[in-house]
Amino acid sequence: MSAAYFEVEQLSLSFGGVKAVRDVSFSIRAGEILAVIGPNGAGKTSLLNLITRVFDASSGSIRFNGQEISRLARHDVVRQGIARTFQNIELFEGATVLENLLLGRHRAHHGNFFSQMFNLPSVQRAEAHTRERVEDVVRLLDLAAFRHRPVAELPYGVRKVVELGRALAAEPQLLLLDEPASGLNPEETRRLAYWLEDIQSELGVTVVMVEHDMSLVAAVANRVVVMDQGQVLTDGTPAEVQADPRVIAAYLGT
């Protein structure tokens, strides 16, 4: 087995006397798609919020590429190569699809104030790369027909794709997705599965996906971590976890 690319160890989060995340540990190898599943209230989104520093961990560690990141400033997380989407779509509705995708490039370095003021060749090259990267995302996610339309005019399913695209525009090494199939119809979910496979195989991005849709999980996940009541219940392949009596009990009750 190759060394862990991303590792969470004994991670906990408390709100007063309530433990939302309890001593969670797991690791991911580079290039994997890991699904995190569990019933509502299991602590899945809280886990993503800990990784992206929305919340401060009560205890434990998070290591990415060998570096401890659990105490980084929030804005430094994306600079490490980590991007995410949200359970509730967080787009600028008055802006166009292209403008929203360009916002995903905010971590890209376009030179200092002096070089930008005089539009030096280095700035022009950086801006050209930004445009090329955004166009790559437009092509990958079939967004060409929507590029100049305001997000507010788009159907819900397309908005979900735009948010995925904005995260990809940041050129992440690790992509965190919070319920990417939520609200999608079966055809949209099938397209999402194809895109996730392309993101993994063509872009080489490692993915952690919180998801309830088990058809999507079974289609794309290499491995599944099951959470219940803030802790890891089991870890295995999609087939293994679906057959685990503990998982069935967590979802359906005993």
Image: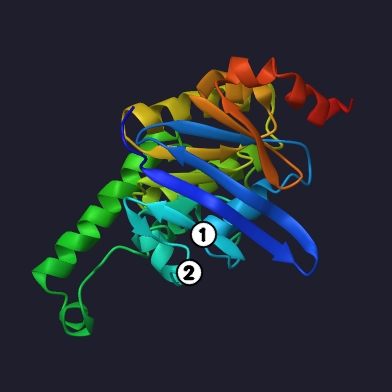
Corner quadrant of residue 105 = bottom left
Identify the residue position indicated by label 2 in the image: 74
Which mark is on residue 34? none
Considering only order in the chain, which callout, 2 or 1, is on the residue closer to the N terminus? 1
- Residue at left offset 66%, top offset 54%: 46
x, y (%) of residue 218?
59, 19
Corner quadrant of residue 216 = top right
Residue positioned most to the left: 121
Q: Secondary structure at mark 1?
A: loop
Above or below, comparing residue 164 to residue 110 in the picture: above
Above or below, comparing residue 40 to residue 69 in the picture: above
x, y (%) of residue 187?
63, 21
Residue positioned most to the right: 254
Along the viewing direction, whichever of 44 and 13 lies nearer the viewer: 13
Along the viewing direction, whichever of 203 and 114 lies nearer the viewer: 203
x, y (%) of residue 38?
71, 36
Q: Is the residue marked by circle 1 packed among few (<14), some (14-19), or many (20+) residues within 10 Å? A: many
Q: Secondary structure at mark 2?
A: helix
Q: Mark 1 to mark 2: distance in Å?
A: 7 Å
Q: Quadrant of the N terminus?
A: top left
- Residue at left offset 45%, top offset 45%: 175
Say whether marks 1 and 2 touch (CB < 8 Å): yes
The amino acid type, in three-letter code, at marker 1 is Thr
Along the viewing direction, whichever of 149 and 100 lies nearer the viewer: 100
Q: Quadrant of the C terminus?
A: top right
Identify the residue position indicated by label 1 in the image: 52
**Is 78 on the left or on the right of 18, as rendered?**
left
- Kindly tell me whether residue 149 is visible in this rendering: no
